[in-house]
Amino acid sequence: MKVATHLRTTGCTCLLIAMTACGGDGSTPTVGPDELEPLIPVDSVAIVPPQQFFGSLSHFKQILALALDEDGSVLYGDSSRFSWSSSAPDVVSVDQEGGITSVGWGTATVTATDDGGATGTTAVTVRDAIRVDWSLVLPGGIDAGNVMGSDGTIYAGTNDWNTDSSTWYAISPGGDILWSLPLPYYIEGYPAIGSDGALYLASWFHDEGGRLIAVDPDGSVRWVLEDLERIRASPAIGPDGTIYVPGHRYLYAIDPMGEVQWAHEQDDNVFLFSSPAVASDGTIYVGGDDRSLYAINPDGTLRWTFGAGDRIRSSPSIGPDGTIYFGSHDGRLYAVHPDGTERWSVEMHCGLPWGCLRADGIPSIGPDGTIYMMVDGVYAVDPDGSVLWHFPANQSSAAPILGADGTVYVASIYPLVDGDGDGRIFALDPEGRLMWEHRTEGSAGGSPLIGLDGTIFAAASGGLVAIVEHESANGGFEGAPWPQVRRDRANSGRAGG
């Protein structure tokens, strides 16, 4: 399908790719059906995506129909301009805006018909794939990452912008709040858990600098290390328990007692959003806003730097052979050898009229070496650097989480054409095919967790939701060299265990 569209509007001419914005402020304009006049007759209709899967009942999805000319170019993409019908209304109902709702088990064909008689269809399957085991609403919603302890306890945080504070919760696998801890610090990154169960939280607040906070498993504060540079990324933990955390000019190495062992210094604002990753030999890798990937020795000395095409806010992930994978604002995924030489790089999505999307996502690495990364959806890239498939979803800097059976779990706004502000938790098979999705009320984001029994936990609907798959072989998460945002349930950011 060609991506160019030609619309006649009263205010502006837009170039659309499924759905985009027209206007300098980045917002999507409201264009009524009577304001659109196709330049040439509609030859066919395409529905995006061509297949839909629901894993439970009473879920709604807005889908998009595209009117195409005989060359496959898009004339318009306003779903309200079509007539809609369902072959099985007792399975899937459809409104005249192209919104579908799962109402019964089975399959249905949803058809969009243009005024001239051209039609397009999408196959909809509703299967009893999942159930929501429980959901928990937390004040303010989870926006400070989450992590899972070795006993399955989930630790999640909420931030309050009005008071620049946060509250941290310990939540049982059954959804009970075990304790809560208010902290006078704003926390943005993912926490990490040490071998003794200590929870490490990194904070920042404007000109007041950064802090590293250690919290015991019972919810009491063990220590607070102050007077650090502002920290907006996540800590990593080395094999000896050393905590590595970046703060603007410095990469800090801090021992489990809260003492700074060394601080590797670069120019101001180099170490911003990229979180460090620790290789099996102790080398620390972290991206910089100066377009460099840094390799730092365990004693704090610089080993080498690698230059990318733009700033690096993606956090690196490490493959089983030591290859370092990370994204860049130039829209590319990079693979770098442990000696600092480039193995390959690949464009993730640069076919857009406004240029490349920033590749800020964190790569996950599957059991067979396939790399999965979020940009404008989920990309699967083989270890040689070839894009295997792409599944469209909202841009995200989070990472997919991989089950041992190769299932890819994502929390995001999906698909891009929804525009309803609600999120989706969805599962893809290793070939990129949608297995199920669950619509959330409100946003969904961050990286999901896989519990000890295979339950999927995700930040959504102002809190946490637990989803149980009726049939799953995700293996309770284990099996891949870097299967989630910070490699393991403890978010250690460390290769090789």
Image: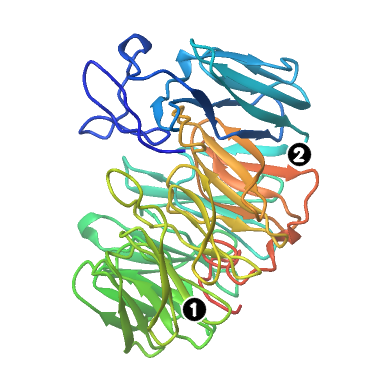
Looking at marks 2 and 1 on the same chain, the residue that comes earlier in the sequence is marked by: 2
Q: Quick one: 318 or 220, which is closer to the camera?
A: 318
**Residue for point 68% across, 59% down:** 406
* View extreme (front): residue: 70
- The local secondary structure at tag 2 comes to loop
Q: Which residue is mark 1?
A: 323
**Residue for point 61% across, 78% down:** 497
Decide: is 410 above or below 242: above
Residue 124 falls in image quadrant: top right
Q: Is residue 254 visible?
A: no
Q: Amino acid at mark 1?
A: Thr
Position in image of residue 150 (x %, y %): 67, 65
Q: Nearer the viewer, mark 2 or mark 1?
A: 1
Q: Which residue is mark 2?
A: 129
Q: Amino acid at mark 2?
A: Ala
**Residue for point 61% across, 19% down:** 111
Q: Quick one: 446 or 324, which is closer to the camera?
A: 324
The 10 Å Cα crowd at callout 1, few under 14, some 14 to 19, many 20 or more, is: many
Q: Seen in the image, is 160 located left or right of residue 454?
A: left
Position in image of residue 383 (x %, y %): 55, 71
Q: Seen in the image, is 377 located left or right of residue 439?
A: left
Decide: is 3 above or below 430: above
Position in image of residue 38 (x %, y %): 35, 18
- The local secondary structure at tag 1 comes to loop
Number of disc labels: 2
